[in-house]
Image: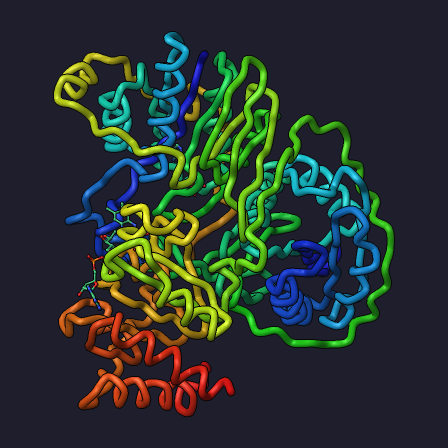
């Protein structure tokens, strides 16, 4: 089985994010860059499928600057076979342009399944997986927490508001991972050593036959700002639990008017 | 292209989700600024009866795609149908709720129509004829103002962020010209916990963290029930196996903006705050006065949650009568 994984390098979730001087981007000094947490689930799931089948290839695709190769290498160290980094260079790409680059790279490839994360924790776009599937003309299944594969079909359990649903689609298909799908493995030391020798190709938009005009961002950032800092309010005082609770309920009822 | 705003309505078990009314309300303002009308599209099977209700939120025209193939939400089928409706209605803006299905549909549609998509927006306006949206990024640590280009542009709005403003619209109900075509993907089973409120739609959330000490969430559940709210969990509580992943609030869980968020035995790690700091009022109950959540909470009680919660439950029952 040929499995493709879509993976993005993002700031670690514990990072403090601050707006850079240009007001359009974030300060990058001091940021620890990691594989998007949902993409860890995607890599893990792809590896498990290959291991269960006993054959096949897991190929990682990522759109990002040269630095993003680190995240691809982490995926290779977990056990993926090869990586493709698509470097847009000076082009500013939005979610749709990212999807176009990925779809253009995937089109000539042979694949049975594409696994992505359901969102990237930097832009929180929730866009790339479904957009890639649309551009390739295949099914996409989102928020996947369980999957069952047969030769020509995939059946997934997906979280939806208030419950779950099961969706079935013919292969090839794209699935987007949600927490609960698996527990991603860590890269082992031998894995990290081996990853250094695994193939990692870099491609440009031109290599993929795409013209910068087709990749112009349709969503443009005008300004970034930090939301107003929440100020700590008041610690409710009282001699007994009863007194504290009574004061809290009074405040919520009469002052904040939320109950 | 018209200057109209088309809201894609969402039904859950036969009733419109609240976010649909929020989207229509936001749509009224946007349409007024653009000099157009708000239209609505309703998709499903046996939904014609429900559709007329949308006139109460300003819909001038309601396009209904009623088809057995739309009984369950399947991204490709809905994308086909909505693309057809857009072709017919030629709106300037397509608005959806940023729900599980709304986000999925919007993403696929953006690629189909080769147009701008802004997901999970918290504010919208028109500036110099162009739609500008504000959306949280980096788990809410940053707010981005973005401009969108395309015909139409697509915006999904975060539930609970837009006021609902009833307004009488003409509400003409029409059949939509929606060709669904052959779609092999299908929903084969559904599993809903009856009466379970989704966190993203709840007005009140009571969250338990590692301080709960175990899978017994009774105290938190009782309080949530008294308040008519939903139960949330920190990632630690989920990782311990005490709560399902779908209850997780935070940067890698759900982002919520309820009127009232009560965090019990939650320390307030940066990833947790990312998911709930846009709540209107935050209450923290923690035995550690130095816990980071205390500096973000509007009201805090320093104390043992097992002592505080039962008393709180009783006191709230009193005012609820
Ligand atoms: C990639 C990544 C993503 C993450 N995403 C998320 C996310 O989406 N959501 C999330 O929540 N976390 C997330 N985390 C985890 C986060 O960093 C914290 O570890 C987690 O939020 C801590 O959970 P907690 O507050 O329940 O536990 P703790 O930090 O252990 O805090 C427990 C609190 O309970 C209090 N307490 C204990 N007993 C009592 C008692 N009897 N009465 C009152 N108070 C008591 C303690 O004083 C303490 O403040 C993520 C971490 C990583 C690395
Ligand atoms: N630059 C990228 N390169 C590769 N995959 C990406 C990229 N951006 C997003 N993805 C994939 O799409 C998922 C959702 O991202 P997003 O739509 O940006 O929220 C991620 O979890 C990845 O699997």
Of residues B111 and B226, the one nearer the viewer is B226
Residue A158 makes an appearance in the image: yes
Q: Quadrant of residue A245?
A: bottom left
Would you place residue A190 above or below residue B246 in this image?
above
- Which quarter holds ligand 2? top left
- Residue A202 is situated, as x and y percent measured from the top left of the image, at 32, 20
Residue at image coords 37%, 17%:
A58
Q: Quarter of the image containing the N terminus of chain A? A: top left
Residue A18 makes an appearance in the image: no
Q: Quadrant of residue B81?
A: top right
Of residues A33 and A4, the one nearer the viewer is A4
Would you place residue B259 above or below residue A173 in this image?
below
- Residue B225 is situated, as x and y percent measured from the top left of the image, at 47, 69
Residue at image coords 22%, 52%:
A15
Q: How many marks?
A: 0
Residue at image coords 46%, 32%:
A146
Residue at image coords 26%, 71%:
B305
Left of B12 or right of it: where is A111?
A: left
């Amino acid at each position: 089985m040929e499995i493709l994984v879509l993976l993005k390098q993002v700031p670690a979730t514990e990072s403090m994010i601050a707006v850079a001087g240009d007001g359009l981007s974030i300060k990058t000094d001091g940021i620890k860059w990691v594989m998007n947490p949902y993409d860890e689930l995607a890599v893990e799931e792809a590896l498990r499928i290959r291991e269960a089948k006993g054959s096949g290839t897991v190929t990682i695709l990522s759109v990002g600057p040269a630095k993003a190769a680190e995240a691809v290498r982490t995926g290779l160290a977990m056990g993926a076979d090869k990586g493709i980094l698509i470097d847009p260079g000076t082009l500013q790409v939005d979610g749709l342009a990212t999807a176009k680059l990925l779809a253009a790279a995937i089109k000539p490839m042979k694949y049975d399944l594409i696994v992505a994360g359901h969102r990237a924790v930097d832009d929180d776009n929730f866009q790339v997986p479904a957009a890639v599937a649309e551009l390739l003309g295949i099914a996409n299944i989102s928020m996947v927490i369980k999957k069952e594969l047969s030769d020509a079909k995939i059946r997934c359990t997906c979280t939806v508001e208030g419950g779950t649903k099961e969706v079935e689609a013919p292969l090839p298909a794209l699935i987007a991972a949600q927490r609960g799908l698996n527990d991603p493995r860590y890269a082992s030391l031998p894995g990290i050593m081996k990853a250094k020798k695994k193939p990692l190709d870099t491609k440009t938009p031109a290599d993929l036959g795409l013209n910068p005009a087709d990749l112009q961002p349709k969503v443009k950032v005008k300004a970034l700002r930090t939301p107003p800092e929440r100020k700590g309010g008041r610690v409710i005082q009282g001699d007994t639990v009863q007194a504290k609770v009574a004061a809290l309920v009074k405040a919520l009822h009469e002052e904040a008017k939320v109950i | 292209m018209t200057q109209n705003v088309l809201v894609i309505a969402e039904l859950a078990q036969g009733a419109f989700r609240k976010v649909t009314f929020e989207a229509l309300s936001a749509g009224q303002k946007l349409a007024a600024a653009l000099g157009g009308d708000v239209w609505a599209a309703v998709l499903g099977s046996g939904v014609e009866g429900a559709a007329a209700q949308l006139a109460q939120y300003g819909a001038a025209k309601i396009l209904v795609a009623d088809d057995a193939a739309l009984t369950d939400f399947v991204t490709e089928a809905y994308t086909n149908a909505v693309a057809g409706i857009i072709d017919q209605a030629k709106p300037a803006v397509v608005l959806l709720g940023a729900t599980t299905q709304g986000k999925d549909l919007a993403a696929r549609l953006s690629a189909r129509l080769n147009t701008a998509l802004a997901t999970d927006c918290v504010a919208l306006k028109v500036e110099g004829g162009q739609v500008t949206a504000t959306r949280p990024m980096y788990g809410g640590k940053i707010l981005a103002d973005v401009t969108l280009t395309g015909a139409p542009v697509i915006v999904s709005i975060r539930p609970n962020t837009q006021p609902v403003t009833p307004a009488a619209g003409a509400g003409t109900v029409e059949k939509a010209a929606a060709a669904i075509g052959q779609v092999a993907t299908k929903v084969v089973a559904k599993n809903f916990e009856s009466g379970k409120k989704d966190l993203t739609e709840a007005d009140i959330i009571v969250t338990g963290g590692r301080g709960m000490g175990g899978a017994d969430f009774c105290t938190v559940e009782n309080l949530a029930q008294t308040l008519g709210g939903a139960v949330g969990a920190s990632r630690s509580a989920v990782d311990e196996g005490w709560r399902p992943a779908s209850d997780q609030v935070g940067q890698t869980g759900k982002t919520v903006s309820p009127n009232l968020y009560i965090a019990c035995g939650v320390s307030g790690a940066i990833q947790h705050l990312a998911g709930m700091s846009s709540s209107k009022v935050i209450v923290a109950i923690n035995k550690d006065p130095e816990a980071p959540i205390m500096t973000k909470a509007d009201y805090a009680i320093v104390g043992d949650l097992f002592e505080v919660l039962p008393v709180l439950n009783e006191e709230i029952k009193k005012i609820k009568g």
